[in-house]
Image (cartoon, helix red, strand yellow):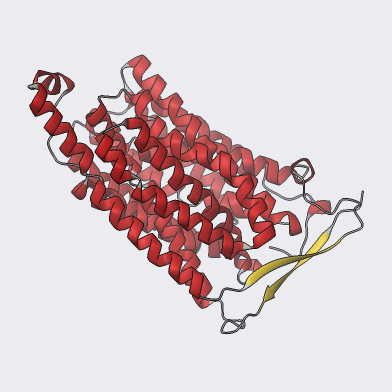
Amino acid sequence: MNHATSKVTVSKKSGTGNNYLIPLILVTSLFFFWGFIHNLDPILIPHLKKVFTLNDLETAFVDFSVFIAYFVMALPAGYFMRRYGYKSGIIVGLLFFAIGSFLFIPAANTQQYIFFLGALFIIACGLAFLETAANPYITILGDPETATRRLNFSQSFNGLAAFMAPIIGGKFILSGTEYTEAQINAMLPADRQIYLAQEAASVKGPYLVLGIIICIIIVLFAVVKLPDIKHEEESTDSNNGASISKILKHKHLKWAVIAQFFYVGAQVCILSFFIRFATTAAGISQLQASWYAGAAGLAFMLGRFAGTFFMQFIAPNKLLILYASINVGLCFLAIFGTGMITVYALIGISFFMSVMFPSIFSMGISGLGHDTKLGSSLIVMSIVGGALLPLGLGYISDLTGNIQYGYAVPAVCFLVVLLYAAKYWQPQQNHTNNNLL
């Protein structure tokens, strides 16, 4: 069977030429914004748990609403961008992002949990477009030899957001007033209604400001000219169109989808339940825990920069093997440890898991040629792991009455990443296209 080959061309529109600096800055900013919105979820989970008196499994539907959107929208995003290009896909994604942010205002006014979940779903539909576009766009804008390092660098700003979001969200969303469910139920009905209304309303300001900022970013993308990356196909295949069954014959892509499913599930479990875990396992307050969550975000950011540096000397798959092995050990410390050592274990996991997403992504789309956009969509679809695996953590926590036992879930996830990096990461020679990546 003859396989298509392709080469990459960059449309040199006026004002761009070969200068990738402005496109890199604008696209890299997207990594910060979707990192920021994702890392508000660890604040939202304990906050909504308090407002709606939820158990751990019910709070996991915050993550489910976000990451199921990736599964629903990733392929439509990929097909959209194959037809209309990366820039159009980015603008559509930003529009979803802004609309979802503004919907937090009526959600807070109605005080209905389902409306919060709906707003998060719409935001995440936009993020599916953004991640489907931005990840491959970064890998292509520049020297193919440095694609993985360049993507890790851009994703480092996702880490910066992971540091800032819990601290900012903790300050403006968490009230610092922590009542038990029994204390809330003991309030007079009028007092309880006022208290819960105030707690629900605290999300309005942060999400309104975020929506306005995203609108400004939309204008910038609309007016700034970006190079349009195109894949010119030269094929003797009777069917030149990419298909899922065809590109999944690339074993390294198929396993990248599997590894990314489990990695994202692990990341969401670690970060989204961080505050809930810290207040239970270490006995600290939510506001204190939000600062430690910020420290985990800082560790995540530093891990991205450190990983980008180390990849100059260590092959990405070997670094993944080392980091995944360390994280399995740290998960066991979080499960069986006591006190603050368990919180420090989660911070350590944040550092070592930081390079996993961009490394799996860039290795997974390596050699796909004209199938890169659809391959990117499949890897983005695998982010649905962030919707499903936290439900398992929440279920184990509720079943055992100990959230620490739920961290067996990310331990298994890191074992799958270890398997991918050790055995299945390398493209098959007959599928490798050396003209791309």
The furthest residue to the top: 399
The answer to whether residue 154 of the structure is visible from this angle is yes
Above or below residue 25? Residue 103 is above
Query: Along the horizontal axis of the image, is 53 left or right of 311?
Result: left
Q: Residue placed at 26% from the left, 39% from the top?
A: 108
Q: Residue placed at 83% from the left, 61% from the top?
A: 5
Query: Along the horizontal axis of the image, is 79 left or right of 200?
Result: right
Question: x, y (%) of residue 339?
Answer: 23, 31
Total label count?
A: 0
Which of these two is toward me, 122 or 274?
A: 122
The answer to whether residue 178 of the structure is visible from this angle is no
Q: Residue placed at 55% from the left, 52% from the top?
A: 129
Above or below residue 295? Residue 84 is below
Question: x, y (%) of residue 427?
Answer: 73, 50
Q: Residue placed at 35% from the left, 62% from the top?
A: 213
Question: x, y (%) of residue 394?
Answer: 39, 25
Above or below residue 14? Residue 60 is above
Position of the C terminus, as image quadrant, is: bottom right
Which of these two is toward me, 418 or 242?
A: 242
